[in-house]
Image: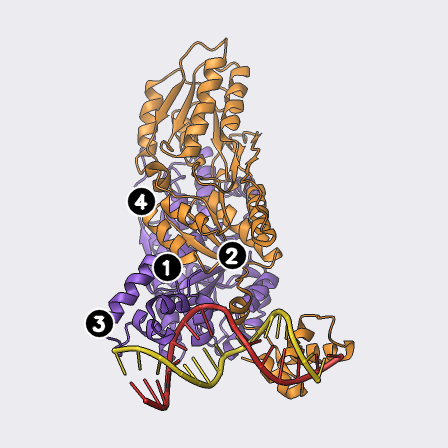
Chain colours: A purple, B orange, C yellow, D red
Amino acid sequence: MITLKDLAKELKLSVSTVSKALNDSYEISEATREKVKKLARKKNYKPNKAAVSLRKNKTKTIGVIIPNILNPFFGRLLHNIEKGASKYDYNIITCISNESLEKEKKSLELLDGSVDGILIAVAKETQTLNDASHLKEVVDNKVPVVMFDRFIDSIKCDKVITDDYKAVYDATNHFLREGRRHIVLLNSLSGLNVGKLRVNGYVDAIKQSVVYKERPKVVEIANDDLVDVNLAEYIRKEKTVDAIIAIDNTLGAVALNVLKNQGKKIPDEVSVIGFSSKHIIVFTDPKLSTIAQQSRKMAKESLRRLIDRIEKKKNKESKTIIIKSKLEHRETTKQT
Amino acid sequence: MITLKDLAKELKLSVSTVSKALNDSYEISEATREKVKKLARKKNYKPNKAAVSLRKNKTKTIGVIIPNILNPFFGRLLHNIEKGASKYDYNIITCISNESLEKEKKSLELLDGSVDGILIAVAKETQTLNDASHLKEVVDNKVPVVMFDRFIDSIKCDKVITDDYKAVYDATNHFLREGRRHIVLLNSLSGLNVGKLRVNGYVDAIKQSVVYKERPKVVEIANDDLVDVNLAEYIRKEKTVDAIIAIDNTLGAVALNVLKNQGKKIPDEVSVIGFSSKHIIVFTDPKLSTIAQQSRKMAKESLRRLIDRIEKKKNKESKTIIIKSKLEHRETTKQT
DNA sequence: CTGTTAGCGCTTTCAT
DNA sequence: ATGAAAGCGCTAACAG
């Protein structure tokens, strides 16, 4: 690996001059600057990152902790975060908590000190146990932290979330306007913050309706190997269901399959809405109406916030940003 | 952030003694070692990574370049790589090439010098254009590199791949033994190395069969928005098709849906086999027989190879490791 | 405009 | 068993 010293020796200049030249310092003459840069390029010089970090006390690296890479929504988010970060000239260190509090703590431990800031969507376990001591410690250490999608209320930091409540509230009203009179919400996310918000949106919409007489019906469905069997059984029992809101798209896709197998016409007899990540919809037929989660916006906004904190060190109040999700209607494909 | 110096001052010891104590040097007495460690714990001391890296000329970080995080197979791989790395006490820097040669070059540039080794599955574009200059440069720089899944033949480095040829060869023979007489291979990966191997496995199995009289039939299907429409049209034309090998699982899932919509009995009338990542299969019903790609094994083996190179600096010949994939049969779920 | 010097936090000889 | 000192590669006062 070639160093500043090497360049300096070859050019018969001092190390500091070379350094300044490469960093476009106004102190250096045009001529030497060019000379230095030329040689650097020729020798394929690359500044030693560790040395720069040590010296400047900055790593130009952001730590990202996500709960589950196999969830396409988080996959998308990671993808967009990575994309955005390289624009700002930041690196990404990715940790996957796998929905485990233990792993999340370890990841945070690891990142603390070796990154300039942290982007985190907390694990399921963290939310259900509501254990945030590790997060508090990092924030108290003055490490900039932004929570996205999954957050802990009590931690004072910027948060970027979707309007889960309103999204489901609107979706439910959409069904009510269509004249649906037996609307069910399938819930696989109990315990999660987002889950609760979504459920509340549904419940409130139902309760506020003057035409709808049924009580809100939230069905807990474990999203495991038997999800299709369990769902099939439920739907066979509840013959009058004419609308389903699936709290995530996996459930939505499974519900569609089950309904098709039972010979239901979609969306005439039963309509289905699910949360989105484009990825899954491709595999469902008829295609699913979805409440689009805008992963791009969310990634962008989270990054912007974090980098703002890192670079401007503003001591503004912590802010919570809400990304609006919008209901997307998809054509039902012809049954050939 | 607390440093060795801080600890030393408080304990009235020298920095070097403290350093040695924390690193369990035999030169340090039991008593002081304990004392030092106790204070370090109490003060929550964390060694400055940049300083250690600079000094030891090692980063304890591995760079991973993946073409597409939204492909669940790569998602799984990343997940398993991350998991394995933390066991070996290595960090991961993730770059996503998004199947672009340009982005891959940039990522490599970025990683070169700031990681101890690189794990890469090359982008589609890299394989089709067969442009490997950037990879050659890194390898020539003596940076340990391991290619996994997607590789470039001409680069001299360890490779960990699946036996795509044999997997499809076996699957085809499986169909032949079942008495299938119109077996079609759906190809969306032309241009990719793995794609070619899979196609060859199919073609050879067909050609070597003495009972099967048809010629191999490789159908190019672009995996785009119209994939279902195009596929439906094809299948309606080719009425006698009784077996389909889908070169990736997206295609497999789509094929299943299309067949179901056309009222075909699966697997009696038409049988389908696809490449796997568990993730997608969940959404297909009847479930798809798959050629399982063992992402866990692949991740583990790649890591083992890379860390071996990094730490032992062995100058062994470059080795190519083939991960055996195995055919998994899934029950067709009852059509309720 | 260029060079000298100090030091970021750590490890590692080499004394003592 | 402990400490002093050098130096990893870089930047940034400060001096000239």
Residues tagged 1 and 2 counted as in contact (Cβ below 8 A): no
The three-letter amino acid code for the residue at tag 4 is Arg
Q: Are marks 3 and 1 on the same chain?
A: yes
Question: Residue B284, relative to residue A70: is it above or below?
Answer: above
Residues tagged 3 and 4 counted as in contact (Cβ below 8 A): no
Pointer 1: what residue? A167
Q: Earlier in the sequence, mark 3 or mark 4?
A: 3
- Badge 1 local density, few (<14 within 10 Å), some, or many (20+)? many
Q: Circle 1 sits in a helix, a strand or a loop, which is it?
A: helix
Distance from disc 2 to disc 4, alpha carbons, whole Å, reads 47 Å
Q: Name the residue nearer the viewer: A228 or A46.
A: A46
- The structure residue drawn at horizontal position 34% and vertical position 32%, both measured from the top left corner, is B228
- Badge 4 local density, few (<14 within 10 Å), some, or many (20+)? few
Q: Are marks 1 and 2 on the same chain?
A: no
Pointer 4: what residue? A330
Q: Nearer the viewer, mark 2 or mark 4?
A: 2
The three-letter amino acid code for the residue at tag 3 is Glu
Question: Residue A132, relative to residue B94: is it above or below?
Answer: below
Residue B205: x percent and y percent? Answer: 49, 18
Pointer 3: what residue? A30
Q: Are marks 3 and 4 on the same chain?
A: yes
Q: Nearer the viewer, mark 3 or mark 4?
A: 3
The three-letter amino acid code for the residue at tag 2 is Asp
Q: Circle 4 sits in a helix, a strand or a loop, which is it?
A: loop
Q: Circle 2 sits in a helix, a strand or a loop, which is it?
A: loop
